[in-house]
Image (spheres, grey):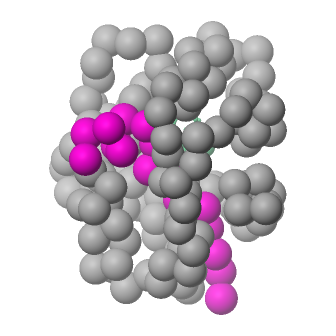
Amino acid sequence: IEETLVLVKPDGVARGLTGAILARIEAKGYALVDIRLVEPDRDLLAEHYAEHEGKPFYEPLLEFMMSGPSVAIRVAGNRVIEGFRSLAGTTDPTSAAPGTIRGDFGRDWGLAVQQNLVHGSDSPESAQRELGIWFD
Ligand code: GTP
Ligand code: MG
């Protein structure tokens, strides 16, 4: 069975949306396999976001991700990687479709980084790599 890493990012935790986000994952029928509250350091985030190093939003992204705890969730289900990204909606919360997590709860706050509430792994390789980073 496929697994993915979902993060409720610091904005989602601070706004009290963790429960609402978990409810959508459960309502879709995916299984919560493991869950933990994490306050990541820079090394963890540099590993997680290695693909974005050098981009204009990289430093603001790391600062944002260190601004408070995230909830890391190991989620399992058939085609859960694709399925969770569909639940999350597109990266930019302004244009994310209503009905998605980002479309319903997110918006542009005019900051240097998109505060878009959640992360979901984008491939089986990313999922295995990221689950190792956040759970080991
Ligand atoms: P994740 O599930 O968090 O990985 O989102 P994603 O796959 O939709 O986005 P991506 O991996 O491309 O970028 C990681 C994170 O960087 C995003 O979730 C945003 O928080 C931020 N980000 C990505 N692209 C931009 C951008 O063009 N501008 C800004 N300001 N932030 C961005
Ligand atoms: Mg991504």
In the image, residue 64 lies at what x, y percent? 51, 24
Residue 11 included in the magenta stretch of the image: yes
On the picture, is 55 further left or further right than 119?
Answer: right
Q: Quadrant of ligand 1?
A: top right
In the depicted structure, whether residue 26 falls above or below residue 70:
below
Q: Quadrant of the C terminus?
A: bottom right
In the image, residue 13 lies at what x, y percent? 36, 44
Instruction: Give whichever of 129, 122 is nearer the camera.
Output: 129
The image quarter in which residue 122 lies:
bottom right
Residue 135 included in the magenta stretch of the image: no
Q: Residue at x 77, y 22 (%)?
A: 53
In the depicted structure, whether residue 49 falls above or below residue 37:
above
The image quarter in which residue 57 lies:
top right
Instruction: Give whichever of 113, 42 is nearer the camera.
Output: 42
On the picture, is 8 further left or further right than 48?
Answer: left
Q: Residue at x 37, y 71 (%)?
A: 25
Can residue 97 be seen here? no
Total marks drawn? 0
On the picture, is 132 further left or further right than 102?
Answer: right
Instruction: Give whichever of 84, 97 is nearer the camera.
Output: 84
In the image, residue 49 lies at what x, y percent? 71, 35
Q: Quadrant of the N terminus?
A: bottom right
Q: Which residues are magenta?
A: 1-16
Q: Residue at x 41, y 61 (%)?
A: 86
In the depicted structure, whether residue 23 falls above or below residue 66:
below
Can residue 60 be seen here? yes
In the depicted structure, whether residue 102 falls above or below residue 37:
above
In the image, residue 129 lies at what x, y percent? 80, 57
Instruction: Give whichever of 82, 34 is nearer the camera.
Output: 34
